[in-house]
Image (cartoon, rainbow, N blue to C red):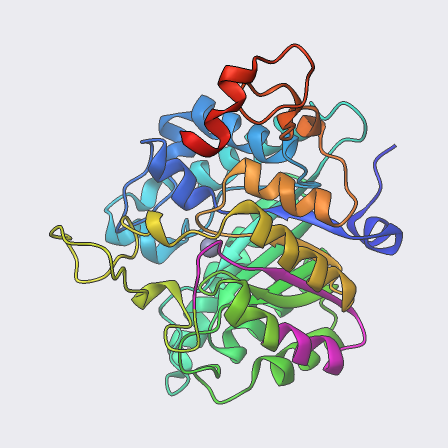
Amino acid sequence: MKRTLAERLQDGPVIAGEGYLFELERRGYLQAGSFVPEVALDNPEALKETYRDYMKAGSDVVLAFTYNAHREKMRIIGKEALLEPLNRNAIRLAKEVAKEHPTEEALVAGNISNTNLFDPEDAASKEKVRTMFAEMVKWCKEEEVDYINGETFYYHEEAVIALEEILKQDLPAVITLGLMGENILRDGYTVDESCKILSEKGALVVGMNCFRGPATMQPYIEDIRKNVDGYVGALPIPYRTSEENPTFFNLPDGGCSCHLPTETTFPTALDPLYHNRYELAEWAKEASAIGVNYIGLCCGASPAMLRAVAEAVGVEAINSKYSPDMEKHFLFGKDETLKAHNLDYRTKA
Ligand SMILES: [Zn+2]
């Protein structure tokens, strides 16, 4: 038995692991900059292992890694011919991993995202965007995904076009917005206004993902929760963003004295700016307490962080058996056989 996304949302929080872009870059299989997921064709085993690691850490869904794998990006890197095989392969690999789940087969989601082409003043750009979404959604439909996640839209209208194209092909939609530092979507909608419209137009889940850490996403999630009757999703990045620097695009590292290839810590020098997993777990509890239904993490997240988030909202992960337990640690444990001369190091090390 495999419950649908709607059934799972009814039963309690759904955990969604994201962040493959940064994770596969860190593992050495993806280039920072263009950030195109060629890994689905070049190194399918590496992609499967990453899918698997997030699923084992508690994700109810294997999100096909087709973020940025749209016609425009593929054209820029000169590989437009690979567009369709890449999309289809990313979904097929996700399906193979989803079936490995030992208790209940994981959901498989297709993925579309901001195109960077959308221009509110240019009708032709809107048609182009619509065509790009339509072809990707069609491949998702043919590969039989359970739903589609349209994400990181910073124009309300682009999110609406994505939603319309998903609904046209009769698939459930999760639509999450990416809010830039100006704290409002580029076409003047607040995120809660936009989410209300998207929810009323038929998105199963609406909310936010990426760009912002818990501290600068949660206040907007609260607004969305107040304004929307349907299901709400939140997937922040695991970095310490602040009111002064609300997104990871311009997060400074006060302690860094080395030369960075770009003027920003984004995207490859963010490491010292991480939240620890306990802070992320605290956030997840808070999100769940206000009624967020679809909870996860985005770029930068590790499986151990996702597992802490899942456990914080009462979900046991496949790999919860490896969750921290310091009882037998040689310095910090409590086992009677531990040596006193070692335990001294708790304070002296
Ligand atoms: Zn992200």
- The residue under the point 61% across, 13% down is 338
Residue 163 sits in which quadrant? bottom right
Q: Is 120 located above or below residue 56 in the figure? A: below
- Give percent across and percent down for residue 314: 79, 45
- Residue 266 location, x and y as percent? 29, 57
Quadrant occupied by the N terminus: top right
Considering only vertical position in the picture, is 83 above or below 126?
above
Along the line of sight, the residue nearer the viewer: 340 or 146: 340
Q: Which residue sits at x=67%, y=68%?
A: 206
Q: Is residue 224 magenta?
A: yes
Magenta range: 220-241
Residue 258 place in picture, x, y as percent: 13, 50
Q: Give the quadrant of residue 129.
A: bottom left
Q: Which residue occupies the foreground of this view, 263 or 322?
A: 322
Horizontal arrangement in the rendering, residue 251 relative to residue 314 (left or right): left
Q: Is residue 187 left or right of residue 32?
A: right
Location of the C terminus by quadrant is top left
Question: Is 322 above or below relative to 63?
Answer: above
Nearer to us in this view, 244 or 204: 244
Whether residue 62 is visible to the viewer of this picture, yes or no, is: no
Q: Is residue 117 above or below residue 132?
A: below
